[in-house]
Structure formats: structure tokens, C-alpha cells
Image: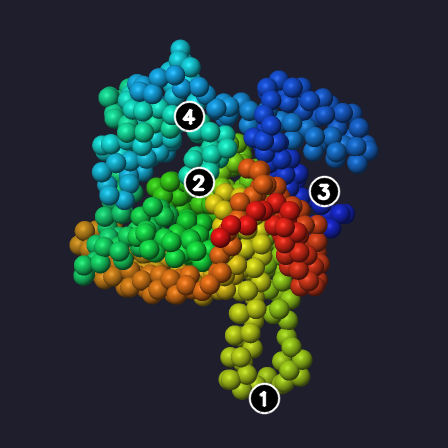
Amino acid sequence: MARPDSLEQDSLTPDRFGHCPSLWLALPLLLGCSVDAWIGVAPGPWLLSGAAAGIVAWAGRSRALLASVMLVIAGTCLGAAWHQLRTPPAETPVVRRPFVELPVMIERASPRADGEDWTGLGWITERDGPYFRRRVALSARGECPAEGAELMLAGGLIAIKEDAEGHDAWLRSQGATLKLRGGRVLGELAPASRFARWRQAQQRRLDTWLRNMPWDDPDGGALLAATMLGRTALLPAEAKEAFATTGTLHLFAISGLHIAGMAAGLLWLTRRARLPELPAGVAILALLWLYVQVTGASPSSVRAWIMAAFLWGGRVGERDTPALQSLALACAVTLMLSPEACADAGFQLSYAAVLGIIVAGGPAAELCARPTEEERLTPAAAQTARQRLRWRARKFLLGGLCVSLAATLAGSPLTLGHFGTASWGGVFVNLVLVPLSEIPLMLGMASVACGVSDGLATPASWLNGLAGAWLHAMTWIADQAAQVPGISLHAQTRGAHAGPMGAALIAVVYLAQCEAKSLWRLLGIPAACLLAWMALACRWTS
């Protein structure tokens, strides 16, 4: 991180790119993990190549270009080796017996909406069997287990094809090559940790608390629980379809919107209480970390928390922490802890959208916010309330459209590649629903705060009711927008890797011209590249 520079903030010009160590760490690491996820080789050659490149970089450190290229090669090779060592085998296994009994370590598990069954992901731990270290998608009956528990499961086992489509394609992106259907728990081989059981208990408690309303409204309770817990599976089917069609389903994923809103509310409380800044900041980060863990630690929530931690750390240390470097640091930390995340759709969409907002949407919004000739020539004393309202509305609408367009351009190749659909209408619908989503989020936060005492259940239920009614109104808006003909584009990409490669292309274009001072270069060139990619890489469907 660099000392503050009042003349040049968050610059990526060639003469300052070398002062962005987080990018030099994150980009090669991400490239290495992605390359290994694509082609996959034994870790030995990757490690040897990385070590050799590192030695050459050290020997040629007096030559900046050579050292830089070798460092990128070393980081890429070491990232690929780390991905290979940490991820399960990717080739499709041969299943000889349809019914099996297997020991499985639970990685993720969540109950179905009906509460009777549960689904999740796990690792097969049978060392002597043919499926050791395989990741398996689970669908079983009974009570949902806590993450980290090792269970003996029985059920029907099938392999997931490499060219799978739909939900199976998503499972493949999570590293799963097997599915266990109709599972039944035969016994517990090892219990989950106390912290994992605590997280599960708190999630259930919050789910029940948020559904408590002063009137009968199960759909409103489900909408609020999905908003605060980041579980789109809780959404009513009609609401989920409307938000997905309009490209606004991300409102129900724990992300920067949730973390920033909660951090702002907690900071306001600590300042009102006049608490010391350093202890209060540490306490707020700890509370937000617990919230991220309780809600499942999704890639978007982890990214938002790490960015918040780095931004706060830079402020406390009196150092400049640009948003782009914080994003790169969050990416690097996530891949170090979980390199297989590079293939996760949530990880890709979260980082692509935020990158687009930081390097294109934000600068474009600032360009749109520049005073017009009328504003510059009208003295402050002569300005009318109507004029000021019109100017503010123009800045809000144009700035919001720039941010929404930048995020949509960055994420469209991924949504087309993973889900076969993308919503151009989301550019406009997000402009309406994103600001509106702050209201139920704040009401939900207040309701959760009331959870410290059962005596506050009554006011909490009214807060839940207001939030549920507001979410019903948002669902109505999304549903009306979803009726617009052609609001969503439907296409199949030519190859499983076409979507991520398209997103990488847009990201490179964003980074290459993020210092531009024109709207055409910031947003027009990425849009033209997206159209060219769609023409070459997509097969359109009805």
C-alpha cells in the first residue's frame, strides 16, 4: 500500500503499476488456478517451473522487464500447483455399483425449503476405495448436519458428465464429479466442531426470528430470511423467477451491500457512544466476520469482508488503500485459502462485477457528475430548489446507470456461460431496486439486534412485517419488469470455458483503459467487446 498522493489516487499508469503489489500477487495466482482448472497437470512440473522462474527473476532483478515477466510466470505456476494440490480429481469416475455406502466429510449443507430433506457438498474419505478425495453432491433425508461432520451415507451414486448442463454443470463448477441421491445417514463417524454447530444453530434461530410477523405472511418472511441470510433457496418460486429474469437476484446474496450497510450502522452506534476508534473497529470487524460465517461464508461475503478489513486497516495505519488493491488482496487471500474457488460461479460473478464498478462504473459516474454549463454559470444565491433537485436527479440517474452498466457488462459472459441467460434490463431495474433494498436490510438489521432479548420479539415482528411488505413491493416491481418482452437474452456458449474467457477479456479491457477520461472508452469499448464475444461465442436460443 502506498502513502496518500493527493495528485494521483488509485492510478494504474505504467510507471505506477509496479507499486500495486496486490495486483502482482492476485492476477498470476488467479491465472494459475484457472489454467490448472482448465487443463490440469501433475503439481510437480508446475512447482519446478515456478521455482525456476523465481530463480531467474532473482538473478535478473536488475532488469525490470525480465524480472517482472519471470515473477508473473512464477506466480502463475505456483498458483497452478497449489490449485492442483488442494482440489479433488476432476476426471469423471466410473461408477460400478449404483447403490453404495460411503464415509463423507460434509463441506456444505443446507435444508430444503420444505425442511424435510437437505442438500450439500462433501468429500469422500474412504482411503481404500476408488472414490477417495472425490467431491460429491449430496441429497439426503433427515436433519441437516453441521459442516465438518463426517457421516456414513447410503444411497444411489451416479457420475456427473463433463459436458453436463443445467444444475449438473453448476455442480461440476464446484468440483463435484459424483452425485449421491436418495441418501440416508447410517451414522456419525466424527462430529462437527463446536463452532460449526454454533453457526448452524444461529442460522436456524435467525431464520425463525426473521419469519416472525404480526400477521400471516409466510412469503414475506421467506423474502426477509433470504435477504438477511443470503439463501436464494428460501425465496418463493415466483419471486425467484422474477428477480432472476431481471438480473437482480444478487440482491439476495450476502455482498458489499450487506457488509457496507451493517458497517455503517455499527459505526454510527459506536460514534454516538463515543467509543475509541481502534477497539470499536476491531469489534465491528469481528461482528461482521461472525455474520459472514453464520450466513455460510459465500465468496461474495468473504470478498466484501476482506475488502472492508483492508480498507479499515489502511485508514488506521494512515496509508492509502485504493479499492482496486483491496479487491486484489481479497482475491489473493481467498485463492490462498480455497484455490478451487476460481471455478465457482459466485466467486467469478462477485469479483467481475466489483472490478467493473471500481475501474469503469465509478469513474464514469464521476464524469457524469461534473457540473453542466447551467450549473457553473448559475450563482448559488440564484439557484432554485427545482433546479437543484433536477441536477441531483440527473447525477443520481446517470451515475447509477454507469455503475449498473459496468457491472452488467462484466458479468454477462459469466451468466451466459453458467446459466444460459443474461438480462440487459437489469441495467435499469437495478437502478430502482438496489436503493430500495437498503430499507428491508436496515429493518432486518434492527430486527436481528432485537434478538438479544426475547422480550423484544414484538417490536422485532413489526420490523419484520414492514420489511416483508417492502420486499413484496420490490417483488412486484421485478415481476412487472420481467413481463417486458425480450428483457432477458438466452444463449448457449460454445464450450464450457467460453464464459470465463469472455469475462477475462472484459476485465483486461477494463484494466487497460481504466485511466480514460471519456465515457466511450470506459463503457463503450467494453460493450463493443462484449457484443463481439457474444457474436463469436454464443448460440442463441428462444
- Circle 1 SS class: helix
Indicate left or right for 61 with 83 as reference: right
Residue 249 x, y percent position in the rendering: 42, 53
- Label 4 sits on residue: 159
Residue beneath disc 3: 18
The answer to whether mark 1 and mark 3 are in CB contact below 8 A is: no
State the SS at label 4.
strand
Give x and y (percent) for residue 504: 62, 44
Disc number placed over residue 166 in the picture, else none: 2
Q: CA distance from mark 3 to mark 4?
A: 46 Å
Residue type at mark 4 is Ala
Vertical position of residue 126 compared to residue 534: above or below: above
Q: Sequence-wise, which precedes: disc 2 or disc 3?
A: 3
In space, the residues marked 2 and 3 are separated at their CA atoms by: 42 Å
Nearer to us in this view, 470 or 534: 534
Q: Callout 2: helix, strand or loop?
A: loop
Q: Sequence-wise, which precedes: disc 2 or disc 1?
A: 2
